[in-house]
Amino acid sequence: MNDASPDNEPLDWDDVEVSADAADRAEDLLRDFASDAELDMAVIVDRSGGMVAGVASRADVDVDTVGALVAGAFGAMRSLARELGEAAIVESLHHGGKDTIYLRQIGSRYILLGVAELNQPAGIVRERAAQIAGPLASLLGEPAESGTAPGGNAASSPSPNAGAPQSGYAYDIG
């Protein structure tokens, strides 16, 4: 499939650079996100799996390994969605035996991960992620999203299709 959209163009990873100040501010946003959504872990990685910032309350998890796995899983889900005709995938949700794992694309280069206990409603995680998506994108030099998930604040003027779904969902019931 030859799709010329910006999401399908190879990235010049030499241009992906996050200052220490931006990483620290991203970590502050993640800490608030984790607190508000009652997460065990909140991480932002670039699409190659490089860690930008992260917070975790679980000592049994290596956040660097998680970052690499997030990038691979998200890339695979984007490819699957594209193969099935989905124009773009912005969110992915996994309900496991004990955790809910939530992924959200931030701009074209970054992925947000939130991990919560299964009893935490996924809608709360999704809503809080939508609320910090714009500030994270801005902080990381990414264009603001043209729309947000329900409950989020639009990062720019509403488009004519503002009420229409902005993405598909991928559910992996494990």
Image (cartoon, grey):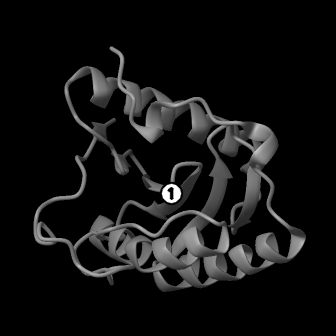
Q: Amino acid at mark 1?
A: Gly
Q: Would you identify the image quadrant in which residue 157 lies?
A: bottom left
Tell me what residue is drawn at x 67 percent, y 43 percent.
Answer: 66
Residue 166 in the image: x percent, y percent? Answer: 23, 58
- Pointer 1 residue: 107
In this image, 136 relative to 6: left or right? right
x 42%, y 80%: residue: 131
Q: Is residue 62 visible?
A: no
Left-right relation of 131 to 89: right
Image vertical order of residue 146 relative to residue 6, above or below: below
Occupied quadrant, residue 2: top left
Where does the N terminus fall, quadrant-wise? top left
* Extreme residue in the front direction: 4
SS under mark 1: loop
Q: Quadrant of the C terminus?
A: top left
Relative image position of residue 76 (x, y in whole percent): 45, 27
The answer to whether residue 113 is above or below residue 147 is above
127 vs 34, left or right, is left
Query: Looking at this view, is 95 or 110 the one in front?
Result: 110
Q: Is residue 74 above or below residue 116?
A: above
Regarding residue 6, the answer to whether it shows in the image is: yes
Looking at the rendered structure, the number of numbered marks drawn on it comes to 1
Name the residue at the right extreme. Answer: 20
